[in-house]
Image (cartoon, grey):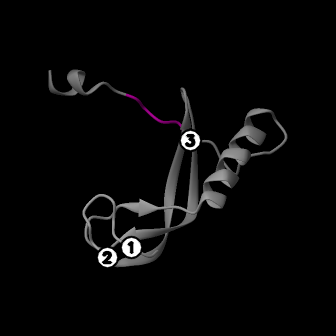
Amino acid sequence: MQGACSFCGNTEFKSKSVEYVYRRGEKMLVVNGVPCTQCTYCGERYYEAEVLSKIESDFEAIENGTREVEKHLSVPVEDFSRLVG
């Protein structure tokens, strides 16, 4: 990536593979090994448009039943006010 981080202004980045969570409404897809460029100072991540497009199209294929997922996770959901209160 060229330029500066839009969050902190740092100009140093590194390439990484990360976990990416795609969410649409109440449904989510967790994708492991997603390539990105990450700011070495604040950790802000930048993804190529093609990568995000592929994740979105795979989500749609999973939703319409034309693609199977590797595994399913059960994720508990809690409101913060219930945790502190």
Residue 31: x %, y % from top left: 58, 54
What's the residue at 51%, 54% (across, down)? 20
Label 2 close to label 1 by CB (< 8 Å): yes
34 shown above or below 59: below
Q: Which residue is at a point 62% across and 42% down the rendered structure image?
A: 72
Q: Residue furthest toward the front?
A: 3
Please give the name of the residue rendered at 27% of the width and 72% of the height, measured from the top-left corner. 10
Q: Circle 2 sits on which residue?
A: 11
Amino acid tagged 1: Gly
Q: Point out the tag, 3 or 2, that comes first from the N-terminus.
A: 2
The reply to whether the magenta stretch includes residue 85 is no
**Residue 74 sits inside the magenta stretch:** yes
Which numbered tag is attached to residue 3? 1
Sequence order check: which comes first, mark 2 or mark 1?
Answer: 1
Which labelled disc corresponds to residue 73? 3
Image location of residue 39, percent across then percent down: 34, 70
The kind of secondary structure the magenta stretch mainly shows is loop
Q: Amino acid at mark 2?
A: Thr
Query: Marks 2/1: CA distance?
Result: 6 Å
What number is the disc on residue 58?
none
Local secondary structure at mark 1:
loop
Q: Are marks 3 and 2 in contact (CB under 8 Å)?
A: no
Amino acid bearing label 3:
Leu
